[in-house]
Image (spheres, rainbow, N blue to C red):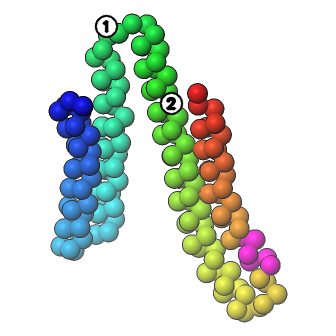
Amino acid sequence: MSVLNLILLAVPVVFLILSVAIAAKAAEHGKSRKKTLLVQLASFAAVFAFCFVCPLVASAAGETAAVSDAVAVANAQSNGIAYIGAAVATGLSCIGGGIAVGKAAPAAIGATSEDPKAFGKAIIFVALGEGIALYGMLISIMIISNIG
């Protein structure tokens, strides 16, 4: 492994560690939570773009490769993009499911404490929120099973 590859592997990790440290300092100095969250999201987007672009640039630099090597590189890139798609599908659906369950479960507990007969109706809404995460996982399994 060359020194350039080690540097390219270390840059995203260092950048994420620095962004967490900057966000922690901003929170200590009384900055708003919204601004701190936006800094974290911006740093994640920058690292994502860096990790997505670097393999494309590295593969474009090796134009002297044979046709079979170019096909192998293209297949590897499409597999990588499919894995990213599966991760995004699972991640976003789990975040959405967590938000849904986080709001539905306390309401279900409150409804059950007022009327114990409402438990069956209330638990259905909690299960619907959990279903969102299961659908995302199912889509990820379908994406990963089509790779290859």
Residue 41 higher or lower than 48, as above or below: below
- Rendering coords of residue 91 (x, y %): 51, 53
Say left or right for 53 vs 124: left
Q: Residue at x 56, y 65 (%)?
A: 98
User: What secondary structure characterizes most of the magenta part?
Assistant: helix
Q: Residue at x 61, y 70 (%)?
A: 101
Q: Residues within 10 Å of mark 2 (few under 14, many from 20)?
A: some
- Rendering coords of residue 14 (x, y %): 21, 50
- Rendering coords of residue 65 (x, y %): 35, 9
Say left or right for 6 vs 77: left
Quarter of the image with the N terminus is top left
From the viewer's side, name the closer residue of 27 and 6: 6
- Rendering coords of residue 2 (x, y %): 20, 30
According to the picture, the residue beneath numbered tag 1 turns out to be 64
Magenta residues?
120-125
How far apart are the alpha carbons under marks 1 and 2?
A: 22 Å
- Residue type at the position of mark 2: Asn
Q: Which mark is residue 79?
A: 2
> For the residue labelled by badge 1, is the local secondary structure a helix, a strand or a loop?
loop
Task: Mark 1 and mark 2 in contact? Answer it, CB < 8 Å.
Answer: no
124 within the magenta span: yes
Name the image quarter holding residue 28: bottom left
From the viewer's side, name the closer residue of 85 and 37: 85
Q: Residue at x 51, y 46 (%)?
A: 87
Residue 65 higher or lower than 90, as above or below: above
